[in-house]
Every structure is written in structure tokens, then in C-alpha cells.
Image (cartoon, rainbow, N blue to C red):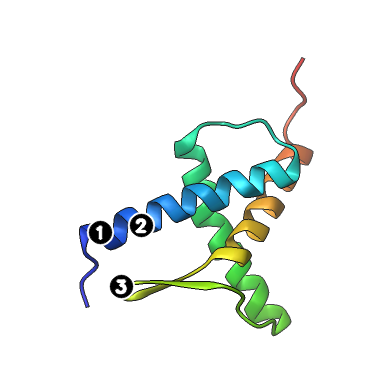
Amino acid sequence: MMMTGETLTFLLLTAAVCGAVGELMAGSNSRGWVVSTAMGFVGAWIGMRLTYALALPPILLVEAGVVDYPVVWSAIGSLLLVAVLGLTSPGRR
């Protein structure tokens, strides 16, 4: 069960899109594609933890090789992450 380069590339692109969507929903300025990708992966982790904790069903799982990527929960997790970061970080002047 090895992850191929195509699978990894697809997951990175999907995470970048989900992170960017989460940033847009939170009203945040774009911080770049690297940060959006990180937000997508961290958002997926946060979103999946929420689904397990609240017993919510998975919504729109994208199958990429051996990995099922939770697109909707990734965007929601990214939204929550950006919102918390926006509330805790000092404002820009």
C-alpha cells in the first residue's frame, strides 16, 4: 500500500484548494499556496476529529489511491483554523 507520486500530487492539490476555500469562507487574505496547502491538511485533520467526536457522517470523500480525503470536512476544518488564528493573532495595521 504505497502512495504513488500521482496520488501525492492529487492530495496536495486537493488540500490547497480546500485550504483556500477555508480561507475565503473565513474572510482571510490569501497567505500563499504553501500555507493554503498546510491549512487544507490541518483542516482535514481538524474536520475528521470533529466528525468522530460529534458522530457526523463523512461528506464528499475523494478517493486518491489508498487515501480517502474528506473534502467538505477539510474546508470546514480550514475555516475553523483560520477563524481561530484570526481571533488570536494581533491585527494588521
Q: Identify the image quadrant of residue 91.
A: top right
Whether 22 is drawn above or below 48: the answer is above
What amino acid is found at the position of numbered circle 3 in the picture? Gly
| Residue 48 relative to residue 13: left or right | right
Name the spot of residue 93 as percent of width and height, x first: 77, 14
Q: Label 2, label 3: how many angstroms apart (C-alpha)?
A: 10 Å
Whether residues under marks 2 and 3 lie with C-beta atoms below 8 angstroms apart, the answer is: yes
Whether residues under marks 3 and 1 lie with C-beta atoms below 8 angstroms apart, the answer is: yes
Name the spot of residue 54 as percent of width and height, x first: 73, 80
Whether residues under marks 1 and 2 lie with C-beta atoms below 8 angstroms apart, the answer is: yes
Marker disc for residue 6 = 1
Callout 1 secondary element: helix
- The residue beneath circle 2 is 10
What amino acid is found at the position of numbered circle 1 in the picture? Glu
Q: Residue at x 62, y 57 (%)?
A: 75
**Crowd class of label 2 (few under 14; some 14 to 19; many from 20; radius 10 Å):** some
**Crowd class of label 1 (few under 14; some 14 to 19; many from 20; radius 10 Å):** few
* Count of numbered labels shown in the rendering: 3
- Going by the picture, which residue comes out furthest to the top? 93
Q: Residue at x 72, y 33 (%)?
A: 89
Name the spot of residue 21 as percent of width and height, x first: 62, 48
Along the polypeptide, which appears first: circle 3 or circle 1? 1
| Residue 52 relative to residue 65: left or right | right
- The residue beneath circle 3 is 65
Q: Label 1, label 2: how many angstroms apart (C-alpha)?
A: 6 Å
Along the polypeptide, which appears first: circle 2 or circle 3? 2
Whether 31 is drawn above or below 81: the answer is above
Q: Residue at x 75, y 27 (%)?
A: 90
Q: Identify the image quadrant of residue 59.
A: bottom right
What amino acid is found at the position of numbered circle 2 in the picture? Phe
Q: Label 3, label 1: how many angstroms apart (C-alpha)?
A: 9 Å
Callout 3 secondary element: loop
